[in-house]
Image (tube, grey):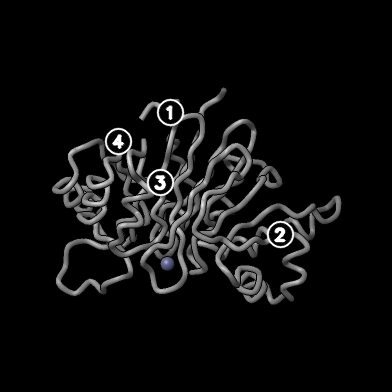
Amino acid sequence: MAPMQLTVIGCSGSFPGPDSPASCYLLEAEGFRLVIDMGNGSLGVLQRHAELFGVDAVCLSHLHADHCIDLSSYWVARQYAPDGPRPPIPVYGPRGTAERIAGFSGEDPTNIRARFDVRDLTPQTREIGPFRVTTEHMNHPLETFGFRVEHAGWTVAYSADTGQTDALVRLAEDADLLLSEASFQDAENNPPNLHLTARQAGEHATRAGAARLVLTHLVPWYDRERSLAQAAETWCGPLSAATSGLVLGPGAAI
Ligand SMILES: [Zn+2]
């Protein structure tokens, strides 16, 4: 069985950066393509790694624009495809997903649902294609889900956006890879219950016993080498920072 492959499409935190779209990750296994989050600019870069209509399912961690706004662009592509509208694909998101995308698009939610089979996420384990996907609520101002995705004995956990939370430690327990947001750096005035510092990302990875930590959701105005140095103070294992185009997985040489 071919191993799972995770391609970082976008890893820029809060808004697109010069070298990366905002949050978007492509997971592939057994010919199935699952996209988690579709932040600003991600639909363009996604087409370097997957056919425009080759996406089988989408998960949205939450409804901040930098995690979901390009789903409205993808709706346009699927609605107005030259050979006619494309059949709906499953879109898993927090309650209100169809309405949010409709708002971005200036459309009625009914039209969004004609192209996307929108399903409410809840904290649970479900099968999506060949993947076993476990979701938990994260610590962020609006409903946000973190993910644990398992396939053929390989496990990746994704924090989405979150402040400190034991739920992330549970999702990442003994995972092969923790893809953790590290929006903040050490400072006195970081707001609570919003984002993790790189140091806190390292702490969560250590507590979870993850095998590898990749920092993501890195905000363009912060120096990533400094973020890596701060994470390394609480995390002793393999550590790197996500970049657009980075391929991760059991078969990837990283
Ligand atoms: Zn957010």
Q: Position of residue 139 (x, y in %)?
A: 36, 66
**Mark 2: few, some, or many residues within 10 Å (few <14, many ≥20)?**
many
Residue on which disc 2 sits: 116
Q: Is mark 2 within 8 Å of ligand 1?
A: no
Q: Earlier in the sequence, mark 3 or mark 4?
A: 3
- CA distance for labels 1 and 4: 12 Å
Q: Earlier in the sequence, mark 2 or mark 1?
A: 2
Q: Earlier in the sequence, mark 2 or mark 4?
A: 2
Residue on which disc 4 sits: 211
- CA distance for labels 1 and 3: 14 Å
Q: Nearer the viewer, residue 200 or 54?
A: 200
Residue on which disc 1 sits: 250
- CA distance for labels 3 and 4: 11 Å
Quadrant of residue 212 in the image? Answer: top left
Q: Earlier in the sequence, mark 1 or mark 3?
A: 3
Q: Amino acid at mark 1?
A: Pro
Question: In the rendered view of the protein, which quadrant contains the N terminus?
Answer: top right
Q: Describe residue 206's horizontal placement relative to residue 88 as left or right.
A: left
Q: Describe residue 180's horizontal placement relative to residue 102 as left or right.
A: left
Q: Position of residue 88 (x, y in %)?
A: 75, 55
Residue on which disc 3 sits: 157
- Residue at the spot 50% in from the left edge and 52% down from the top edge: 24
Q: Is mark 1 within 8 Å of ligand 1?
A: no
> For the residues carrying marks 1 and 3, which lies nearer the camera in this image?
3
Of helix, strand and loop, which one carries label 3?
A: strand
Q: Describe residue 25's horizontal placement relative to residue 232 as left or right.
A: right
Residues at discs 3 and 2 in contact (Cβ within 8 Å): no
Q: Is residue 168 visible?
A: yes
- CA distance for labels 2 and 4: 35 Å
Which mark, by number, is residue 19?
none
**Mark 1: few, some, or many residues within 10 Å (few <14, many ≥20)?**
some
